[in-house]
Amino acid sequence: MVASFARAGHRVVLNYAHSDAEADRLLASLAGEVGERVMKGRADVAKRAEVAAMFAAAAAKFGRVDALVNNAGLNIDGPFLSMTDTDWDRVLATNLTGVFICAQEFARRFTGEVGHILNVSASTAIQGRRNGANYCSAKAGVLALTKCLALELAPRIRVNCILPGRIDTEEVVTRLNLHDPATRATIVNTIPAGRLGTPEDVCRVARFILEESDYITGQNFFVNGGHFMG
């Protein structure tokens, strides 16, 4: 999503929690195209002090932050009866508390006329799934939080939510064992569009929400090729 927005002319803060090397590789791959439009920030979204420092650095470089995309995510799957408090707390901290903290820090600082918060949830927030009680509960909380923020922050800040489906990313391929051709074919056969989604499918919807929608807030956008129809 960083690359997509930067190539579209936006100034972007690339926030990450762990891998300096991966962040540097992404910046290097964009260096010739986007110039100084991308900066790195390193913050654990569940830690308010780190998030506040990230926003301060972004404001120092770019002057003002007009949009926030809450895209940090963590899966620690396991059967409900053996799920530990630690695994529950870690997933909720990143996937739900992180959205709360980042949205609050953004909204408190926003000084423009039109701002956007775009949250990322999942269809399993509605459907549920086995071995994902922590993840699904957190993502369901994101859906409710999106509506609450859309009401409280209107009209200056619009708040919406994207729910991606089976997107062809390293995390999804590994988690669903899509390296196996038979498994991949089985998954694709459940998608009416007849293919896995691409990151750019999600990015196009995100850019529409942030760039072109001026009468949309509190809404869920399913980007899943019809795999789940909410």
Image (spheres, rainbow, N blue to C red):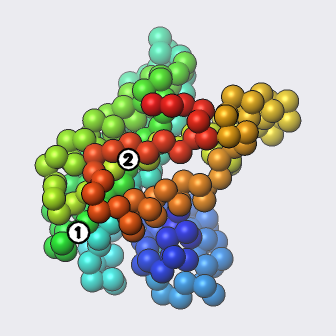
Dot 2 amino acid type: Cys
Residue 88: horizontal and vertical position, in percent? 40, 28
Rendered position, 173 above or below 38:
above
In the image, 184: left or right of 190? right
User: Compared to 104, does 96 lie above or below?
Assistant: above
Per the image, the residue denoted by label 1 is 114
Labels 2 and 1: the sequence-earlier one = 1
Write the residue at 44% across / 52% down: 71
Image: 153 above or below 52: above
User: Which residue sits at x=56%, y=70%?
Assistant: 3
Q: Label 1 sits on what residue type? A: Val
User: Alpha-carbon distance for marks 2 and 1?
Assistant: 17 Å
Residue lying at 65% horizontally and 47% vertically, measured from the top left = 197
Question: Which label belongs to residue 184?
Answer: none
Residue 161 disc label: 2
From this viewpoint, is residue 217 visible?
yes
